[in-house]
Amino acid sequence: MPELPEVETVARDLRMRAGRAALHQRVGESMPGVLRFPGRRGGSPQSSPAAAVGEVERRGKYILCRLDGGEDLVVHLGMTGHLRVVNGDAEVVKHTHLRAGLDDGRELRFDDARRFGRVMLGCPNGAGGAARAPGSRGGASLRGLHARSASSGLMRRTTRTVKAALLDQSGIAGLGNIYVDEACHLAGIRPTRRANRLTRRERSALHAAIRSVLTKAIANRGTTIDDYRDLRDARGSHQEELQVYGRGGEPCLRCGAVLRRRVVAGRTTVYCTSCQR
Ligand SMILES: [Zn+2]
């Protein structure tokens, strides 16, 4: 499932096209659920006048794309969603929910086999559309991690495990199973610890590790385990640098001990009992 670095990579790719691309001739498959028109009476999926793509930003795991016609395009990749720019005559893959022509003859398309993704057209501009979108509980952006008081407070108050607290999207939106395990390993903290038992120094180490892991993963254009692809349909490369995720039973790359795998907070979790305390 795409986490913050993957969504950020797609948003940055899209931002490169801002100002040059113009969406027109919107065509949606009438698959219920994925493509939504929250601002339109009757939720009409009919095509709209061309609208230039303006600012593109990421909020948590939502991509907000401001269109000059007064509406926003909001995309959530869900579990298996792909937002891609392809040649207009490219084969339309199964489960394509949106085809939007660009002014250079190419198309912005969204496909999603499992349909947990969302494409919302017609959110009023500026909307904080994402913040109010279904399933969104807001949360800090990567930039917001620099101001860490909020999530630090969350960690201090909760008796849940570090893993559960970090997975809580209201704390740090976009941090999922992969990067929580990676950050805990980098910080030398077991994900099974009670969050409120961490020392100030450990909390600080954990937040530094989160920033470091996310920044590196963005530089590597995300982690592709199975489905994730960027706007140009290319894989990320951060999977080649994962230290613990998916490596249960294998040796720790830092100390050589066998990595432990167990379910924590309902998710498969991998950590080192030797160098994570
Ligand atoms: Zn180790």
Image (cartoon, rainbow, N blue to C red):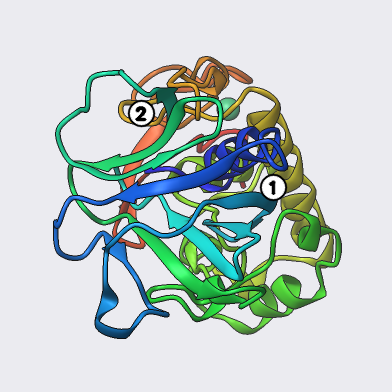
Q: Which residue is mark 1?
A: 210
User: In the picture provided, is 175 more to the left or to the right than 91?
Assistant: right
Please provide percent x and percent y for residue 266: 29, 60
Q: Nearer the viewer, residue 156 or 121?
A: 121
**Residue 235 position (above or below residue 79):** above
Percent x, y of residue 29 = 18, 50
Q: Residues within 10 Å of mark 2 (few under 14, many from 20)?
A: some
Ligand 1 has an atom within 8 Å of the beta carbon of the residue at disc 2: no
Vertical position of residue 160 compared to residue 182: above or below? below
Residue name at image x 47 percent, y 51 percent? 176
Q: Could you tell which of marks 1 and 2 lies nearer the N-terminus? A: 1
Quadrant for ligand 1?
Answer: top right
Look at label 2 and name its amino acid: Gly
Q: Identify the amino acid type marked 1.
A: Ile
Q: Please tell me which residue is depicted at 56% across the width and 33% down the height of the picture.
A: 274
Asked if one can make out residue 85 in the rendered structure from this viewpoint, the answer is yes
Task: Indicate the position of residue 155 as horizontal and vertical percent values.
Answer: 65, 73
